[in-house]
Image (cartoon, rainbow, N blue to C red):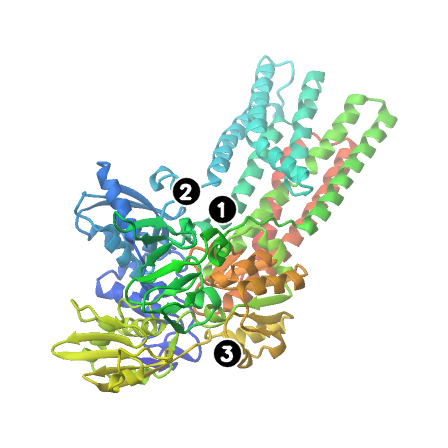
Amino acid sequence: MLSLIKANPDIPALCKHCGTPLASRTVHGGGFCCAGCQFVHELISSQGLDRFYDLQNAALPPAPSHVFGQRDYSWLAARAAEAEQTGEARLVLDLQGISCLGCVWLIERLFHRQPGALAVEVAPASGSIEFRWVAGECDLAAFAGELQRFGYLLGPKDAAVSPASSDATTTGAMRPLVRRMGLCGAFAMNAMLFSVPVYFGMRAEAPAFPIFMRLAFVFATLSFVTGGSYFFARAWHGLRAGALHLDLPISLGLIAAYAGSIHAWIAGATNFIYFEFVSTFTFLMLVGRWVQQRAVEKNRNRLLSSRADPGEVLVPTPAGPEKIPATRLEKGIVYKIAPGHLIPVRSRLRSSAATLGLEWINGESEARLARAGELLPSGAVNCSQSSIELEATEAWSSSVLASLLEIRPRMHRNSGLERFLRAYIGAVLVVGALGFVFWIWRSGDLLQSLQVLTSILVVSCPCAAGVALPLADELATERLRRAGVFVREQSLWARILKVRRILFDKTGTLTLERLALANPEALAALSSDEQAVLLALVYDSFHPASACLREVLLAGGVVPVAGVSPKEVVGFGLELSLGGMVWRLGRPGWHTGMDSDETPAGLSHDAAFSRDGRVLARFRFCEEARPDAPEEVAALQGEGHEIYILSGDRPGKVEALAERLGIRKAHCQGGMTPQEKAAWIRTGDRHDTLMIGDGANDSLAFNESFCTGTPAVDRGLLEHKADFYFLGRGLGGVRRLFAVARQRQRAGRRVVLLSLAYNVAAVALCLHGSMNPIVAAVIMPISSLASLAVVFGSFRGR
């Protein structure tokens, strides 16, 4: 039933579920890259949903670890109840994990199997899902738990985001841009329609000529106001902040073309009217900007919009227990937290004992036992089976967790682009001024001289770059997405190749986020009935060792014994009475006579499973490095990167892992607090650090790092602070990011060189006095197409 087998020629090269190339050392039975993929594949197959794989039209990431986890969906039950009270059982939620058409089909099929289900609408682009059901007949919270087992997460929808059905293609800030783009596309077509007759010989004396010019002016004005204002505002805000970006030359070109065309129209110089150029150029620049933003918007929409929240706590009052937001806690308040929830503020334990998980707050993977009266840190997780009572010793505003959960906007400036634009704009203005002076001196014709100046400003607009560079971003982002790497911040491209030092957290980053079973043969030796009882014991437990056993058992297809309720003996383990027998999982000594009323000195990292005092199996747990960590660390070092470990875990464990991975001992820092991590980076960062972490203890370090990345996408914190995130069990995505960034850089340099060559030729025509709207209308699309061809050629092949 359970098997871990070594790789052999009979195992396929790709994971059966997600298509990830299998590691050369060890794979999960039957050809899967991880236990999660094996588990989800078995679910899909056992429920007759294999068509999911036929409908896949995009890369599928490996199944996340939360398919085995426990999440609190009480918030969803409350929201569903509120929706039913309004008379319309309808609810819009965030959806995480959707990647292809098969995902849409699978979710719809699963929902329609629910009692009372009426309709479901999934919007993959916006990461939204809308449910409609018969009031009182559908349990949405239970359905959310089922979706989680297939790899999808539901979260509360940000109130600022419209329902899924209102716009299935765009979200947030993208909608205004798309509206502008749609309008300017219509304006450009009409402006071109009324300009084409002039290109084909319509003279100014023709009766329709004035009407056509007026209409071209109207549509150019509409484009200038509707689309141009997008670039004008951004260029102005950039100048006020002392920053230059591509919107400035775009704005200068549009203003020059529009103002110069009006002047030429008034002066009767019809050969210098660029109304159709204004409309077409505006539309193309908006398309380029949409392509650029769409690339990262898709990756952001894959995540839940809800951020990490300390949740609610239960506070006793004279009228009975009352739920209040943890953010309202003050010093001295007595409260309770449920299993699996965070301790929001530093508190004193009032319960007799509790089991705590500290991995998220300080990187320690093992659980810790706390006794009555002990001070517990903010950010620890209640891993006990029942609620624990605490007394707050500080207010929420003063807690460590409050500072860690704060998400601050970060401003990144592209100094290289700013230097280039400063030189480029300066050169264009100088050449334009010299051309104006030369033509005044040569001809004495003020109108002709102004048109030379205007034409230089018009043709030097970065039209080709404004379309081709966003395409390079889209191709790079899509290539990474197929490899399980997702860029969240556009500015990352300008920073990532400056990175020389890569700082890794340890637990959950260099290692897998769950403990590993060191002796799986002990589990495989149990009978199927014994495995079913063991799974029933650990199924609802938040203890790290229980989570490890639950993952392996579920991946092996084990079904837990139903209708049982294990109890926890805090500090010892879990106990279940079934069939007249007592089953236990916990500390080895507990099974052979240790008095369970005696509080042990601490928690063992090993566990024993027994029936009526007879030990059936002994399990050993350990941390497991990510499968490709040694190779990837060596490869990154070979590329010239310095690798460091910054961890809150014990220094001995950090140094042992570093030795296995080939990282210098001097580059390892253990036992660090979140503040110490941030200070270490702040004092040493030379705008060349990449921090990769997964827990709240890395949050302050993220604030100080030049670039940031995370493998954790289901905790609501670092995934919203990271420049990129990556999925799967390996670290290969980090090196892949550097490789694709170098490919994008080559494409960008080629486009810039082509654009410079185009500008030299176009400006030469302007200085010669040979530039006119017809020539501009021809060379602009030709240069754009040539730039697009350069980009596609740069991304051809691997």
User: What residue does disc 3 label?
Assistant: 653
Point out which mark residue 356 bears. Answer: none
- Residue 50 in percent (x, y) is at 26, 62
Using the image as rendered, state which of residue 19 and residue 232 is in the foreground: 232
User: What residue does disc 2 label?
Assistant: 169
How far apart are the two marked residues, 2 and 1, measured between alpha carbons? 10 Å
How far apart are the two marked residues, 3 and 1, measured between alpha carbons? 42 Å
Give the structural element (helix, strand or loop) at label 2.
loop
Tag 1: amino acid: Arg
Give the residue drawn at x 59%, y 47%.
468
Q: Is residue 95 left or right of residue 460?
A: left
Q: How many marks?
A: 3
Give the structural element (helix, strand or loop) at label 3.
helix
Tag 3: amino acid: Lys
User: Is tag 3's residue or tag 2's residue first in the polypeptide sequence?
Assistant: 2
How far apart are the two marked residues, 3 and 2, measured between alpha carbons? 48 Å
Q: Is residue 425 left or right of residue 412?
A: right
Tag 2: amino acid: Thr
- Residue 237 in percent (x, y) is at 63, 37
Q: Is residue 532 visible?
A: no
* Residue 74 vertical placement versus 161 (above, below): below
User: What residue does disc 1 label?
Assistant: 294
Between disc 3 and disc 2, the foreground one is 3
Is label 3 in contact with label 1 (beta carbons under 8 Å)? no
Report which quarter residue 769 is drawn in: top right
User: Is tag 2's residue or tag 1's residue first in the polypeptide sequence?
Assistant: 2
Report which quarter residue 369 is drawn in: bottom left
Q: Residue furthest left?
A: 580
